[in-house]
Image (tube, rainbow, N blue to C red):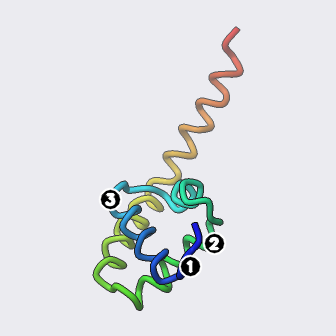
């Protein structure tokens, strides 16, 4: 995704808000690094569109609170698939 960082930040913010996506998933979809997505939605968006930033921050905080559950499920699937013959 090529474009102005300000435009990119708004597009990423709207995508994360609308889908509830994680930073990693958004980065993969848009072909960017996780660090770039984080910088866009955490720093640039705060200055460009504070209202959108607040909505995105709520989604990211929810994802952060749930990440240990997703990690546990991934580990469970990993070891369950190893035991199947």
Q: Name the residue under label 2.
A: 35
Q: Name the residue under label 1.
A: 39
> Residue 68, how many percent across, how many down?
53, 51
Compared to 37, does 22 lie above or below?
above
> Residue 17, how many percent across, how many down?
34, 64
Compared to 72, does 14 lie above or below?
below
Residue at 33 percent of width and 86 percent of height: 50
> Residue 18, how many percent across, how many down?
32, 59
Quadrant placement of the C terminus: top right
Residue 18 is marked as: 3
Residue ranking furthest to the left? 51
> Residue 47, how many percent across, how many down?
41, 91
Q: In the depicted view, which residue is nearer to us: 23 or 62?
A: 23
Residues marked 3 and 2 touching at CB (< 8 Å): no
Compared to 79, does 5 lie above or below?
below
- The residues tagged by marks 3 and 1 sit, at their Cα atoms, a distance apart of 19 Å
């Amino acid at each position: 995704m090529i474009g102005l960082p300000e435009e990119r930040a708004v597009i990423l913010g709207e995508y994360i808000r609308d889908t509830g996506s994680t930073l990693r998933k958004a980065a993969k979809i848009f072909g960017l690094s996780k660090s770039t997505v984080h910088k866009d939605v955490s720093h640039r968006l705060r200055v460009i569109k504070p209202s959108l930033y607040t909505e995105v921050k709520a989604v990211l905080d929810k994802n952060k609170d749930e990440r240990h559950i997703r990690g546990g499920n991934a580990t469970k699937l990993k070891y369950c698939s190893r035991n199947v013959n």
